[in-house]
Amino acid sequence: MLMESMALSEREGLFPTLNENNIDQIIAQLSLKEKASLVVGDGYKSMLSRVLRTKVPVPGAAGMTRAVPRLGIPAIVLSDGPAGVRIEPKRRGQEGTFFCTGFPIGSLLASTWNTEMVEKVGEAIGQEALEYGVDVMLAPGMNIQRNPLCGRNFEYFSEDPLLSGRTAVAYVRGVQSQGVGTSVKHFAPNNQETNRLWNDSRVDEDVLRQIYLKNFEIAIKESEPWTVMASYNRLNGVHTQEDRWLLTKVLREEWGFKGLVMTDWTGKRNTPSQIQAGCDLMEPGGKSQIKELVKAVKSGELQEADLDICVRRVLELIVKTPTFKDHVPSGKPDLEAHAAVAREAAEEGIVLLKNELGTLPLAKGMTAALFGVGSYQLLAGGTGSGHVHRPYVINLDQGLAEEGIQANEPLSSLYANYIQKNSPKKSFMSNMLGSPACAEMPLSRENVEKAVGEADYAILTLSRQAGEGGDRHLEDDFLLSDAEKQMLKDICEVYHARGKRVIVVLNVGGVVETASWKHLPDAIVLAWQPGQEGGNALARILSGSICPSGRLPVTFPVDYFDLPSSAHFPYDYKGGSSMIPSGKKIVDGENVGYTEYKEGFQVGYRYFSQPGTPEVSYPFGFGLSYTQFEVGEPVWTEDSVSVTVTNIGPVAGKEVVIVKNPYLSAFGKTRLLQPGESQTLVLQ
Ligand code: GLC
């Protein structure tokens, strides 16, 4: 009988049964093999349960620990991912579905600059995890956005350590308030996908501490995440998962971290050295690692006392979990309420970049010519472990219809037919990790001229997909493609000739080039990848039901090569997978791939705010509103600054206050202020 199915009451009496007060006694009872099994995960039996046909508590969850039933030690469940719980939406032989709310991506959450909002998202995710039987969420992803081409920036928050750290704190507090753990990742610095298993991030220690570790330090000290996930890569020559300086000296001795460190989903490496470094749990885990540990202790290579330290942390984690506390998952979280949270967060994180000639908000009862595949097939999130099996995605055309703005025919049918014929075929991998975007539909000027008569304005959505396992490219990714540029030019010429406005929506997971074309449209809205309710949120911003209040958490440079990191980012591995850069052979132990963080502190606005540096297209913290605010003189105390914000404009809105001296030192966001209303913010 599996331990998971044994209630706590049945465990009594067989042997001493684990509880939060007898961990040392339990460790003394454990055999060496049992100890080794506790620090090695139970493989892919959960993540791949659909194909392996394994019987597991939560099919599709990323991983589990191993049980020791005779001592009342259950296996616990670890699940991705930052934008929502990632588990199989259907279970063989079980009624009902297990869809999870698709929340906005990390970059959008940071764009809210609203930690209360992020905490609400965390609470909802924690709720769903709890009710679906998950014990630890493998989230938030929070690596610094060092360079726009990193394929996983969508999951991450910002170029700035304070904004990234505080956003992570809010997320962790929200999830853990529901009695479910988190795992701040990927510790660190893991700022590219190319060659991610082997890449050696070579970073000066001061830069490492003040930029790439600082956000993790804030998260650890201010929210006490139950776990930390050590990244795949190397740091200054040492795999982070075997780096005692990082995992024990810095994380534990300096920052006071009391939780567990697990690996990212890595194959077997040097397991004894991972244990000695203070890495407590090898995920996904395999039997060979158990054998290796037993052999290492028996040979004296590994002290059993060192193994016991990790075993203790595994048990300390287990006793906190819902599974250990015999929580009975309902399988029925309040998805409707969580959808509302997802929409609210998206509304707060969408950024208005341009709005001229009073283009926005759009008048209701009008008709919009929607161009771009993304107008009809919104990218709700990125791909990889950050994917979510959402119950639905609201597209822009649907959201606008809700707001009384019709998408004009026959343009919509043209796109619908194209999408149907050209969407990437579903596969096992795309079901598990999300699909690539449908290629953009070629648009002739004739199409544009046909549509202009039937519509009051044009909305062009430009989409970008990115994800785990590969970095982005310059051409046709960071840069607009020639076809996209031509499409934008045609639409602007034709609609402007008729005195009609053009709005561009950026449905992207990361920074794109904007400087060369932003003069063309009348308005530009950065929607990011806004989750399953994205179409509703975007439409409510465009229609003015919601006043935009998002601000950029990252700089949009004029030119990619203006970025100091562009000289030290492996974009030349075009097409290289995250495992092996194109054209290179991995020989373990030999340094076959490294990235030198030669730009040092020159990350984002830390560089561009210096005199003599290039102009940017849109600066860190930038975002427009439909109303105006007056921010009073700051009043400083020893550890805080207070400012009074007044809405002096025509509509209700929220304002973000950003304090830099010279780097970001505090920020806050007002509640919704009606015209004439004031609020005093006290920022720390
Ligand atoms: C992946 C990711 C990590 C994820 C884990 C489990 O490779 O790097 O973010 O949580 O494996 O899916």
Image: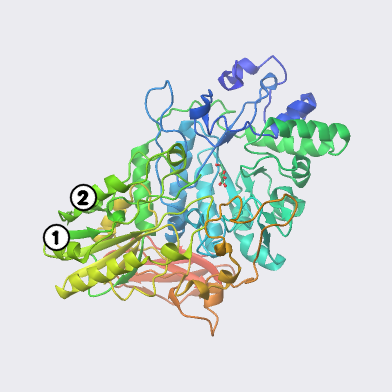
Along the viewing direction, whichever of 503 and 667 lies nearer the viewer: 503
Mark 2: few, some, or many residues within 10 Å (few <14, many ≥20)? some
Residue located beneath label 1 in the image: 366
Along the viewing direction, whichever of 669 and 574 lies nearer the viewer: 574
For the residue labelled by badge 2, is the local secondary structure a helix, a strand or a loop? helix
Q: Position of residue 104 (x, y in %)?
A: 41, 51
Say which amino acid is labelled 2: Glu
Along the viewing direction, whichever of 231 and 196 lies nearer the viewer: 196
- Classify residue 522 as left or right of residue 114: left
Q: Quadrant of the N terminus?
A: top right
In this view, the residue farthest toward the right is 300
- Classify residue 62 as left or right of residue 38: left
Is residue 25 visible in this depiction of the protein? Answer: no
Residue located beneath label 2 in the image: 402
Q: Position of residue 489 (x, y in %)?
A: 27, 71
- Classify residue 46 as left or right of residue 482: right
Say which amino acid is labelled 1: Met
Which of the four quarters of the rendered structure image does ligand 1 lie in? top right
Q: Residue at x 38, y 30 (%)?
A: 97
Is residue 347 visible in this depiction of the protein? Answer: yes
In this view, the residue farthest toward the front is 583
Using the image, determine if residue 298 lies above or below residue 577: above
Image quadrant assignment for residue 92: top left
Q: Position of residue 566 (x, y in %)?
A: 56, 70
